[in-house]
Image (tube, grey):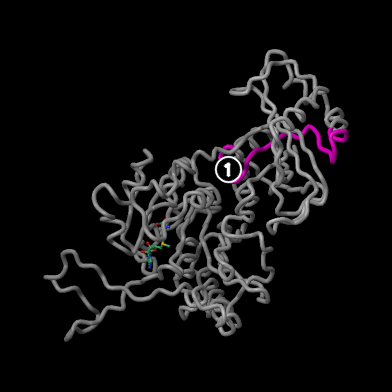
Amino acid sequence: MWFLCVFYHRLLDFRKPEVEALAELFGEDESIQWRLPEHHHNDTPFHFVHLSSEEIAQNIAKRSILVKGMYELWGEGTCYEELKDSIQSFPDSRKLPFLTSDSTFRISVETFRKALTFDEQKERIHSLTYIPFEGKVNLKNPDHNFFLMEMDESEESNGLPPIVQRRIFFGREVGFADRKLLPTFQLKSRTYLGPTAMDAEMAFLMANQAKASSGKLVYDPFVGTGSILVSAARFGAMTMGADIDIRVVRDGRGPDCNVWSNFKQYGLPAPVALLRMDNNVPPWRSGLKEIFDAIICDPPYGVRAGGRKSGGRKILRGTVDPYTVPEDKRTGHIPSTGAYSLVECVHDLLHLAARMLVMKGRLVFFFPVLRDESGSEVKFPEHPCFKLVAVSEQILSSRYSRVLLTMVKVEPYSEEIEEAARLMHLEFRENHLKWLEEGNIHSSVFKPSTDSSQIQTESKTFKDPKPKYRGKYV
Ligand SMILES: C[S@@+](CC[C@H](N)C(=O)[O-])C[C@H]1O[C@@H](n2cnc3c(N)ncnc32)[C@H](O)[C@@H]1O
């Protein structure tokens, strides 16, 4: 069945991948099909999606963050006469069950990039008298919701692409998003926050990409304040996190302000465990594998805070390697750390995921990219155990973006595969990631605009810069 899927006009690259992940979560086994309305640009909020049942469409809309609503389309046209013909030719067998005298209904008018006065909206609704509604109107809690959606031809505005042709849609609502989740979970009311805490909307999108749900175990190896795991727990998953910083996982800012209290605040089950762990030297016992259903994280890639790994200590005078912590300094000892490059961090993350994810488990993580007008195509990290299924760019400034990568484990981990992965990583590091190693990302993001030549030639940047209207929120 085809449904009209109306998106919020934001985070454009994240919208279809979210629906695709949720479709899989709710039981679609084939990859789903998309179709654009006539004359629409890919960034339009209106898309047609083919799903096998209304129940799946409803579940996707309910759980999604970026789907405004899913509709059974009854008609469309470039003017109200065309809309009437289209609605009248939509089969009665599909319409009449929703128009009965014992049911209530409401018609809402929505517009995109235009506004209608209250009287104009009333006029539009009254023009639909040819639809044989038998039931009563109920504006508060109707049995059936109908939507009239209108947009006019328009010039490019605010950098948005022009609408080439006026279009009007009429449809029955099948499901809508519960965005009340966002004010409830917004960071400004979170008790324990850090400088890199993940914004609630993005954390929910990441949890959706990972198909977090009841009975699954979700792991964040760079847990920080736990924001990503909070969203996974909200969707019913069990959670587990780790961080190299003992102050984060053990102490926070006191007994009522820490990662645990962030879960308690929303009445969510606490994480199964929070570990103090360096993802560069994880302490898993040998042979342990396939325990997580999803790994979701925002790795420390060095723009606001760089990664750290164990080591880098100044050897105490007179100490001979390997260094052991003197007995009198053991209590409260915080191991010293050194710089952890993104190259190594990405390698360790893929290695962890290849080994610790169950088959078909998902790895969802952010990866930084520099943008410019002339750059070559970006190559993303690869591993023979994984298939890349979604790439969603969030533009953070005119020269810097982060891209949410979603990978699915398609091959079981083995030592032979690990060797192939090591060679793949060496090639990737040599040809595509070298520029990240020398702290370039920080200097690229913060350098004065005149000093652009050097980094840009070394870096891998987007081939196809996004149009102007794409920004942090769009
Ligand atoms: C970008 S922050 C993640 C923030 C987190 N998503 C949140 O919402 O608060 C990266 C985290 O990785 C941790 N980290 C850095 N190097 C690490 C390593 N080698 N192993 C584990 N954690 C590390 C940092 O302490 C920091 O908390």
Q: Is residue 442 magenta?
A: no
Q: Specify the quarter for ligand 1.
A: bottom left
Please tell me which residue is depicted at 58% across the width and 58% down the height of the picture.
410
Quadrant in the picture for residue 281:
bottom left
The residue beneath circle 1 is: 64
Circle 1: element type: loop
Name the residue at the left extreme.
328
Mark 1 vs ligand 1: CB below 8 Å: no
Where in the figure is residue 72, as x and y percent of width and height? 73, 34
Q: In the picture shown, does residue 285 fall above or below 373?
A: above
Bounds of the magenta segment: 62-83
Q: Foreground residue, 201 or 391?
A: 201
- Residue 179 image position (x, y, % from top left): 54, 40
Image quadrant in which the C terminus is located? bottom right
Left or right, 128 with reference to 176: right
For the residue carrying disc 1, how many other residues have a C-alpha within 10 Å: few (<14), some (14-19), or many (20+)?
A: many
The question of residue 65 being in magenta is answered with yes
